[in-house]
Image (cartoon, grey):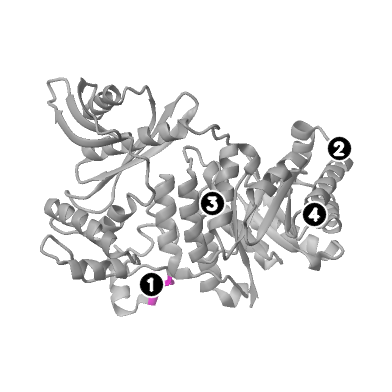
């Protein structure tokens, strides 16, 4: 079977999801997990967007050793130079150039004729060829570009030195038959097409991103571009885990495979969800909480007799394991360590001791600690946020006939203790008003969400907030069996991130790209 290369753009297109803003440490953390997953190519960002993005791409480029690291660039020399700078130190660098080609983009965005588009793209590819052996070129909005012109663009890119030509369905407009036909046409009509790889980049505006990407494979695509959990602008991108499992489950039909380590899928999905704050819907294919759940009596009966009656994928395939080991407050360190190993966490002794202490604290509050509790507990602090302010205590007074009142005790990085009280329209509002007084920071709450990490009345609650200060925004996360405590921790986490970002000489600019 032929290999399909996986181009992951979680760190670039995925980060363009509304409300998502990853810092450098978070980008590196995700990139290293993508490396474990075995993706072939990692698009780390758009270096020309800001000095901060350039630095983040460079950090990823230096950290990743076993995958091609890619920087996005408009067809401009200044952008290309920014990618050159960002990819210094990369083991295997690649530049991803793009220029719009569809009639609507040529007329309204570029105000260029076809010949001008060809000339500009040719010039950019040849300039980049001086510095990069690997060049991917994308005719933006290729799905709505005239087929004969798309053939000319592809021919030009090959002659200029591109090694990959990507066909983006930028606005998710295509259906599988149309999109597959583009690849078929290019294969049949463009000279020397065998000298390059053809790639597919699909958006999910009409819910057909995965179907379109699979249609591209059936018609000769060599590479699929997508994101973990299908995150991305608007309705998102092709979900990489869906492509990987479709090929792995139906090799008889597709005749193609990826070289991903499928057992890392679940872990990668959880990490991306955790750091982006984007909750995975329960009915999400492959990685949703209900993907391997069976409630119907008929289904349960079939599963007990033969799992394949209603389960075409084994949970173990993507790294999910059902364990009979139940942990509680009487569990010992050895059982806890074995549980960590079973869940895929190999920690040093000191880290195990720290995690065990947190586990014991949690076990005192919960009758039974389940796998999802342990994962959430461990992953809460995967990325260290500079703790300018630390929550020490919180006290809330509430009654349905009285005004909510909250008191907080906060320790500063210098050891100063600050105690403040405030009222609010609700308990959370009162807490946040008290924290504002204690930190002496003026911030705007843009988003607040809470979800249950596990089941039951004593389940862990996970709160995500997005705060804005001037033109900077940051997200925060908090975890506790008490949702008010989780709310306070999330808010303070976001404040710390805002203050850390404000020290940066640049603010992140997000651009709507391919």
The quadrant in which residue 270 appears is bottom left
Say which label, 2 or 4, has the lower sequence index. Answer: 2
**Residue where numbered disc 1 is placed:** 316
Which residue appears at 77% of the width and 34% of the height? 110
Q: Which dot marks residue 10?
A: 3
Left or right: 174 in relation to 274: right
Can residue 385 be found in the magenta stretch? no
Q: Position of residue 180 (x, y in %)?
A: 70, 60
For the record, the magenta segment spans 308-317
Q: Which dot marks residue 113?
A: 2
User: Which element is circle 3 on?
Assistant: loop
User: Which mark lies nearer to you, 3 or 1?
Assistant: 3
Say which label, 4 or 1, has the lower sequence index. Answer: 4
Q: Nearer the viewer, residue 460 or 235?
A: 460
Say which label, 3 or 2, has the lower sequence index. Answer: 3
Distance in Å between CA atoms under marks 3 and 1 = 24 Å
Left or right: 315 in relation to 487: right
Say how many tags the image has: 4
Q: Residues within 10 Å of mark 1 (few under 14, many from 20)?
A: few
Q: Position of residue 109 (x, y in %)?
A: 74, 33
**Residue where numbered disc 4 is placed:** 129
């Amino acid at each position: 079977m032929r290999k399909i290369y996986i181009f992951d753009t979680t760190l670039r297109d995925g980060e363009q999801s509304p409300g998502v803003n990853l810092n450098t440490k978070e980008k590196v953390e995700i990139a290293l997990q993508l490396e474990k997953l075995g993706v072939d190519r990692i698009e780390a960002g758009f270096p020309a967007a800001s000095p901060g993005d350039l630095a983040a791409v460079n950090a990823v480029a230096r950290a990743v050793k076993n995958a091609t690291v890619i920087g996005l660039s408009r067809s401009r020399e200044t952008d290309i130079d920014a990618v050159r700078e960002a990819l210094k130190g990369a083991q295997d660098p690649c530049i991803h150039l793009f220029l719009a080609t569809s009639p609507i983009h040529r007329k309204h965005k570029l105000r260029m004729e076809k010949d001008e588009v060809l000339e500009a793209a040719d010039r950019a590819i040849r300039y980049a060829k001086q510095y990069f052996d690997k060049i991917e070129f994308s005719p933006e909005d290729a799905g709505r570009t005239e087929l004969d012109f798309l053939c000319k663009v592809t021919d030009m890119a090959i002659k200029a030195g591109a090694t990959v030509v990507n066909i983006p369905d930028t606005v998710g407009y295509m259906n599988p038959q149309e999109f597959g036909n583009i690849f078929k046409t290019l294969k049949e009509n463009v000279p020397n097409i065998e000298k390059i790889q053809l790639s597919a980049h699909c958006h999910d505006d009409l819910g057909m991103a995965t179907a379109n990407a699979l249609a591209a494979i059936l018609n000769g695509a060599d590479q699929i571009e997508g994101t973990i959990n299908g995150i991305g602008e608007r309705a998102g991108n092709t979900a990489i885990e869906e492509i990987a499992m479709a090929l792995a489950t139906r090799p008889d039909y597709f005749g193609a495979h990826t070289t991903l380590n499928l057992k890392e899928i679940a872990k990668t999905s959880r990490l991306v969800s955790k750091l982006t704050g984007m909750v995975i819907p329960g009915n999400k294919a492959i990685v949703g909480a209900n993907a391997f759940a069976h409630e119907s009596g008929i289904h349960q009966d079939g599963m007990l007799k033969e799992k394949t009656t209603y389960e075409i994928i084994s949970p173990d395939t993507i790294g999910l394991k059902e364990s009979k080991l139940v942990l509680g407050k009487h569990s010992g360190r050895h059982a806890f360590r074995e549980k960590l190993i079973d869940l895929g966490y190999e920690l040093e002794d000191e880290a195990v001791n720290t995690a065990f202490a947190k586990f014991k604290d949690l076990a005192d509050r919960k009758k039974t600690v389940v796998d999802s509790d342990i994962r959430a507990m461990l992953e809460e602090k995967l990325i260290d946020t500079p703790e300018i302010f630390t929550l020490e205590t919180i006290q809330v007074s509430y009654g349905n006939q009285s005004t909510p009142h909250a008191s907080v005790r906060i320790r500063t990085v210098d050891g100063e203790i600050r105690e403040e009280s405030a009222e609010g329209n609700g308990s959370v509002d009162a807490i946040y008003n008290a924290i504002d007084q204690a930190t002496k920071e003026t911030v705007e709450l843009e988003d607040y969400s809470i979800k249950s990490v596990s089941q039951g009345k004593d389940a862990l609650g996970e709160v995500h907030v997005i705060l804005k200060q001037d033109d900077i925004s940051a997200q925060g996360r908090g975890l506790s069996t008490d949702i008010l405590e989780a709310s306070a921790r999330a808010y303070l986490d976001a404040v710390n991130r805002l203050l850390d970002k404000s020290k940066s000489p640049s603010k992140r600019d997000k651009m709507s790209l391919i």
